[in-house]
Image: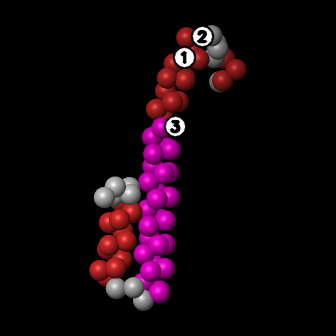
Amino acid sequence: MLAEIVWNVATIAVVGGLAIPLVAIIGGVWHKTVKTNAEHDLKRSMIERGMSVEDIERVMRAGKSGGKH
């Protein structure tokens, strides 16, 4: 099937035009998944160390602010 496709400039442009947003969507989902897993691991380690809920909330809020005060 792929051997029958005529790979000219227009075909490559269409395939590239469809591939770029697809890669961006998959990358965004992957990034969100990795970030969520890292946050869960951090929370789990803070709970294991015996930190209070207030301390954990403060640490998580500080991480979301991006260092801005």
Nearest the eye: 10 or 37: 37
Q: Which residue is mark 2?
A: 9
Secondary structure under the numbered disc 2 in the rendered image? helix
**Marking on residue 23:** 3
The amino acid marked with disc number 2 is Val
Query: Which region shows up in magenta?
Result: 24-49
Query: Quadrant of residue 67 in the image?
Result: bottom left
Residue at left offset 49%, top offset 43%: 26
In front of the other: 36 or 50: 50
Query: Which label number is shown at residue 13?
Result: 1
Query: Residue visible at 54% across and 16% down?
Result: 13
Q: Is residue 10 left or right of residue 29?
A: right
Give coordinates of residue 27: x percent, y percent: 50, 44
Mark closer to the chain start, 1 or 3: 1
Quick check: 41 above or below 64?
A: below
Q: CA distance from mark 2 to mark 3?
A: 21 Å
Residue 52 vs 40, above or below: the answer is: below
Quarter occupied by the C terminus = bottom left
Q: Secondary structure at mark 1?
A: helix
